[in-house]
């Protein structure tokens, strides 16, 4: 990349990273956008609708992902991570480690024949659908994925795991453009850039985690207990049930949403509020009430935090549609025949009861992205006590390192509108630094 023009590195291609990259690119900056997954879009790509408008997530996100891939000032690198960053005068030398896709980006025409021919077709749990659907060992995460080039999952592929796949890999036989290359190797690129934006997003709390999980909630042992993001995949037209809310092939009649699972709970390592969970559950209750006539939707909460523009009005809309809000602290979830039972203390009335239902949705909290501490060390940043990147309290985009900026939920939990705004703020701060205007 030429150093004659301003250049920047954006690490993480969720909605915040994409926004930052596009803002910089539109300003004439050459941007390298690095994403460690197979496609860009982050958690928003897994989401069905956004609150409080119930707009289609993919309708909002896809134009941005397509523009990021096609913008002349943006170079997109997937399956890649920042593994080194060294200050070199007024710029940085960044080391990017790129893992192989085993499919040639230039040759692949995304026809899907390889995925259909794969010996493991329909036998691999979909990571994108959070284990609720089955896919092949080669493919794209979802239909609107950018880039649309297929990729091999090395942890599942028989050829990569054992060095053989029957008499020969059927995917390669089915590919008439010779795009599959099992000999592709990991490579390292070194780039000179003037600014770095970290936008690595977040992970969801795992209620079944062996160290900080909540085994009393029966998550993973009971298929009728799912997380809020799994509900999004069930609700999405591109999900495993094509948008139908089905549990074991049957529409649930009674759904209980449980708040603050892995948030505001020191026993799980997170004393903070994850900010989005209340509104996500209200949105999902509305979706359930609209999709399933006659369904009972109950939200068990500590207190509802509907703080944003239009959020309080959305909560009232959910209640008018029939959503029941109960202040309650669930202590246990267990199966009883074909039902799920939630044992809960009503913290207003002071009594306990057992609520029978068909589906329980856990509002799993937001956690720092795995690898955040290592990335902070590479970028010479620090992490807060909660594990998110430390930022200036009055300038969250500023980061705490000269020329390094923070965007989106890697600096702390936030919703999609705030993540977009954060991406633009980080781009503005990076542009000031690149042009030598104001403070870095």
Image (tube, helix red, strand yellow):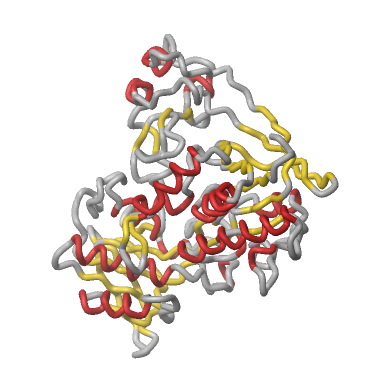
Q: Percent from the top left, x then y, of residue 347?
A: 39, 86
Q: Percent from the top left, x then y, of residue 430?
A: 67, 56
The C terminus sits in image quarter: bottom right
Give the residue at x 44% y 29%: 150
- Residue at the bottom extreme, as displayed: 349
The N terminus sits in image quarter: top right
Q: Percent from the top left, x then y, of residue 49?
A: 33, 58
> Is 197 in front, or is 341?
197
Give the residue at x 44% y 30%: 149
Task: Place residue 132 in its image quadrant.
Answer: top left
> Is 324 in front, or is 123?
324
In the image, taking residue 399 as reference, residue 159 lies left or right, namely left
In the image, taking residue 22 as reference, residue 299 lies left or right, namely left
Q: Percent from the top left, x then y, of residue 284?
A: 31, 64
**Image position of 311 with respect to 291: above or below:** below
Give the residue at x 35% y 69%: 52
- Residue at the top extreme, as displayed: 167
Task: Place residue 36 in its image quadrant.
Answer: top right
In the image, taking residue 436 as reference, residue 418 lies left or right, namely left
């Amino acid at each position: 990349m030429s150093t004659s023009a301003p250049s920047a590195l954006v690490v993480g291609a969720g909605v915040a990273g994409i926004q930052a990259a596009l803002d910089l690119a539109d300003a004439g900056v050459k941007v390298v956008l690095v994403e460690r997954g197979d496609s860009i879009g982050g958690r928003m790509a897994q989401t069905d609708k956004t609150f409080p408008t119930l707009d289609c997530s993919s309708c909002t996100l896809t134009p941005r992902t397509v523009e990021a891939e096609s913008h002349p000032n943006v170079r997109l690198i997937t399956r890649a991570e920042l593994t080194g960053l060294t200050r070199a005068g007024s710029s940085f030398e960044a080391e990017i480690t790129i893992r192989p896709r085993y499919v040639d980006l230039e040759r692949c025409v995304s026809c899907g024949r390889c995925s259909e021919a794969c010996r493991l077709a329909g036998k691999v749990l979909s990571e994108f659908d959070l284990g609720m659907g089955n896919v092949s060992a080669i493919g794209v995460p979802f239909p609107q994925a950018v880039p649309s080039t297929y990729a091999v999952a090395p942890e599942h592929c028989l050829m990569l795991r054992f060095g053989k796949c029957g008499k020969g890999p059927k995917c390669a036989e089915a590919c008439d453009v010779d795009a599959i290359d099992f000999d592709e190797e990991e490579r390292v690129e070194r780039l000179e850039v003037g600014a770095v934006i970290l936008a690595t997003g977040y992970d969801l709390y795992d209620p079944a985690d062996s160290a900080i999980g909540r085994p009393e909630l029966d998550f993973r042992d009971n298929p009728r207990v799912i997380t809020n993001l799994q509900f999004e995949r069930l609700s999405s037209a591109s999900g495993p049930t094509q948008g139908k809310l089905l549990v074991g092939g049957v529409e649930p009649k009674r759904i209980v949403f449980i708040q603050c699972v892995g948030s505001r709970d020191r026993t799980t390592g997170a004393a903070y509020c994850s900010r989005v969970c209340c509104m996500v559950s209200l949105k999902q209750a509305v979706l359930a009430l609209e999709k399933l006539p006659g369904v009972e939707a109950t939200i068990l909460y500590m207190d509802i935090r509907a703080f944003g523009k239009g959020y309080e009005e959305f909560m009232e809309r959910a209640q008018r549609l029939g959503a029941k809000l109960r202040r309650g602290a669930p202590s246990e979830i267990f199966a009883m025949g074909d039902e799920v039972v939630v044992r809960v203390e009503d913290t207003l009335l002071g009594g306990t009861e057992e609520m029978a239902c068909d589906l329980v949705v856990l509002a799993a909290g937001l956690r720092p992205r795995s690898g955040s501490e290592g990335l902070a060390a590479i970028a010479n940043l620090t992490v807060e006590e909660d594990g998110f990147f430390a930022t200036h309290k009055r300038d969250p985009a500023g980061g705490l390192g000269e020329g390094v900026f923070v965007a989106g939920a890697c600096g702390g939990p936030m919703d999609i509108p705030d993540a977009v705004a954060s991406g633009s703020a980080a781009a503005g701060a990076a542009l000031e630094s690149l042009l030598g205007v104001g403070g870095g």
